[in-house]
Image (cartoon, rainbow, N blue to C red):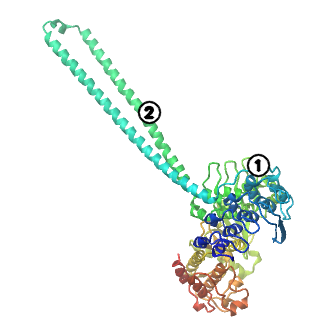
Amino acid sequence: MSITDLMRAARYGDLKGVKRNLNQVRKKDEYGQTALIWAAKNGHSDCIPFLKEELGMQNKRGWTALMWAAFNGKTDCVRLLLSESGKQTTKNSRFTSDGRMVFFPSGTTALMMAAHENYPEIVELLLPYEQGMEDSEGRTAQWYANDSSKEGDYSRVRQLLKNEGSERILPPPNPGEMLELRERVNELTTEIESLKKDLASSKNAHEETKKELSQSNREVSSLKQQLQKANEEAKKNHELNETLNKRTQEAEKSPAEARGEVFSSKVQLSKTDEDHSHVYTDSEAPRKELADQKAQNPALENENTLLKNGSLIPAAIKGDLNTLRRHIDQAGKRGSSGMTALMHAASRGQTEVVRLLRPLEARLQDGRGWTALMHAVGRGHEECVGLLLLERDLRDGEGRTAAEHAESEKMRRVLLNQPTLPRLPDSLSVYCLTTVIGGGAFGTVYAAHKSGRNVAVKVIDLGKYNKKERELLRREAEILPSLDHPNIIRCIDAGEDDHDDTCVIVTDLCCGDLREEMDRRKKANSSYSDQEVWKTIREVAAALAYLHEKRHVHRDLKPANVFLAPDGRCILGDFGVARALGDSSRMNTHTGTDLYMAPEIHQGKRYDNSVDVWALGVVAHELCTGELPFFTVPAILERGPPAIENRDGGLVTLISRMLSKDPEDRPTAQDVLEEAERHQ
């Protein structure tokens, strides 16, 4: 059977396509591959829960989805596929991977594959379920770790397998069952919370009833005492009336005796007051307890809110970028150990999460004084370490830097290789530079911090440029502070150092750019959905419409100049070649990146802000197809853009208009924005 629509959707991570074609579940292609295997092979963990019916299925050589995930290092997929652990291949497999020949005999397990490919986290996950298993040649995972043809430091994997045992535990239930159990647990938790509230309400009502009953008892007791006293007085009066004549002499009793009776009455009255005081004092204890409880309520409510809404850290642990962006306002909050979401992500090698959270949580420290960089170093996650070098100057509670935590010499060299950092102008000396994070045609970009805030500092060496180029660069410093738009990079500070002949611009620190994101997706065989393309067009067009209204032209719009904010917004930046239109609406300076430049610029003609719309059309075409519409300047001048297939018709039409050779036929940035807003 050929590949089905479900397999194709799973292969490229098209979640909507997966949901739409679930009627094709459990089908296999000509090699015995299932949709689940395709999803796991390419790391699309979000598709796996919908394909749980295919768990345990094997291809013609006995490979499972778990094995493919383990071989390709897809840790998130492995976590969801552990129910397949314990299975072994049924035939020999020989193929080429990354230019090297790979051979697995029959009987190979997922653990052996992870050990062979040097994925310590996956080895750690699979070890309890597959340790001690042997392939058809009698070899265990330990042999695969020691005999791999793949280059790299295998010390962690070999250490994990050093004492590989033979006792294994049963595989966990499949994720579908786990999700159902989790949903049931959530339902029961909600029900329990409801019962707790009802119980608390009943307790409160019971306490109120007890108080009312107690008060009633006191009133009844008081009435009984009054009645008894009245009866006694009536009886006494009756007796006195009968013996009045006989006891006349008693009326003449001594003042001393009278004073004694008065004193006795006062004693009784005093005792009554003491009883009242005692009752009042006893009531003070519950009042104080109630006040203490009320004082604790805000803290308890705050903790409860964190428990209910604290989704950032769990999302960081899972690598769930969509949930992270929805809860990005929780950045900076910590768990009980003092660890932030960034620290949890760094310790687990969640590179994309680290890239997203770095601007907001870098340079924070946990209860031990550890930074996210130290957590990444401790677990050997090199890519995360590279993203967190802006923390390498910090020390933990024991006075150690991240370099002192490094076990491998390679990582230690990376951490100790401190670049030479430039001196900033006196007016900007409050910013402390930490490391280089990038560079463009017009300057080097450094990570820096001030008062706990992370920023990007672009330092431009004016000495490298002629007078005309210097003016272009100074214009960026002049233009940026005047711009205020959510889709344009925010300039925090700027200055110039005449002594060092440098120009410095301080902006918000972003978590990457569109070029990096597009390259990562291409490498992972993951395409942009129509809605994602519309969103990018909408946000960049909003920035351009604002810029054009201010009579500025960007002139160098390309993916590398579209930055990404932690909340997922596209932010237009790098105004090194932007220029105010002033009184003239057309220019003839040749600037920008050739393959994103409009035909009129290549032809040396005068041009206006429609060149930015052309560039956005090129970016949009690349988002849709993964390829540029034109690969040479002659093609830009002579050919029409290639057709875009399998995309929303409105999207294709808009991109075609944006790539019109004649500037007059192109829509304005405002037109593009309005069209994109209709597709929200």
Residue wearing tag 2: 285
**Is residue 430 among the parts visible in the rendering?**
no
Crowd rating for badge 1 (residues with CA inside 10 Å; few <14, some 14–19, many 20+): few
- Looking at marks 1 and 2 on the same chain, the residue that comes earlier in the sequence is marked by 1
Residue 474 in percent (x, y) is at 67, 76
Q: Three-letter amino acid code at disc 1?
A: Glu
Viewer-side residue, 658 vs 451: 658
Compared to residue 590, the image places residue 210 above or below, namely above
Q: Is residue 547 above or below residue 132?
A: below
Residue at 57% x, 61% y: name it.
327
Q: Amino acid at mark 2?
A: Ala
Q: x, y percentage for residue 513?
A: 67, 71
Residue bearing the label numbered 1: 167
Closer to the camera in the image, 235 or 665 = 235
The quarter of the rendered structure image containing the N terminus is bottom right
Is 179 on the left or on the right of 138, as rendered?
Answer: left
What secondary structure is marked by label 1? loop
Quadrant of the rendered image containing residue 472: bottom right
Q: Position of residue 365 (x, y in %)?
A: 67, 52
Note whether 486 is above or below 308 in the view shown. below
Location of residue 195 in the rendering, given as x and y in whole percent from the top left corner: 46, 47
For the residues labelled 1 and 2, the Cα–Cα distance comes to: 59 Å
